[in-house]
Amino acid sequence: MRERPPGDPPSEGVLIIDLEGELFFGAAPDLAQHLGAAAARAKLQGIDYLVLRLKRVRNPDVVALEQFENFLRDARAGGLTVLLAGVRADLLDACRRVGIMRHVNAELVFPEEKEEHSATLKAIRAAYGLQAHQKSDFTEERASGAAYYLV
């Protein structure tokens, strides 16, 4: 895993955002702004899957968690599937206690692991798998339409 160099083309299927730092009330406006910008970027690029890498997020408080919950709720309503990667135990516990996890399918949460990048890689693979499944469903749906011919 590496950051995308400026010359590399952007991903056409999955957007990966790495959040880090203290999740406290003073950071809540910046958090809301950055998450909103990520959702807007995904929409602009036609991306339906966003991997949020949260391994370096620390000390969540209720104000920042509320911003996080609003983002997850709005993303889901807007058709953006968010996968959470590298979620530390304390953040996952806080999200469960305040009910944030109702906005995320449990299969899309990849808790922090001892091996570096393993949760992130699992989340990225899952996102690409979901994207491939979505494309195959679309292809099957079109193939099963009214048009039919026999050669």
Image (cartoon, rainbow, N blue to C red):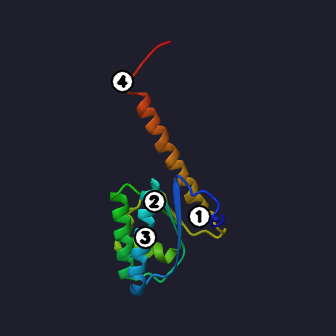
Relative to the observer, which residue lies in front, 28 or 123? 28
Q: Is residue 26 left or right of residue 118?
A: left
Quadrant the N terminus occupies: bottom right
Pointer 4 with pointer 3, Cβ within 8 A: no
Give the structural element (helix, strand or loop) at label 4: loop
Mark 3 lies on residue: 35
Q: Which of the 4 quarters of the picture holds residue 148?
A: top left
Whichever of callouts 4 and 3 sits on the residue coming sooner in the sequence is 3
From this viewpoint, is residue 81 visible? Answer: no
How far apart in space, not on screen, are marks 1 and 3 (Cα)? 20 Å
Q: Nearer the viewer, mark 2 or mark 1?
A: 2
How far apart are the two marked residues, 2 and 4, measured between alpha carbons? 33 Å
Element type at mark 3: helix
- Asked if the residues shown at circle 1 and circle 4 are in contact, with their CB atoms under 8 angstroms apart, the answer is no
Q: Residue 42: which disc?
A: 2
Residue under label 1, please give it. 119
Of the residues shown, which amino acid type is indicated by label 1? Ala
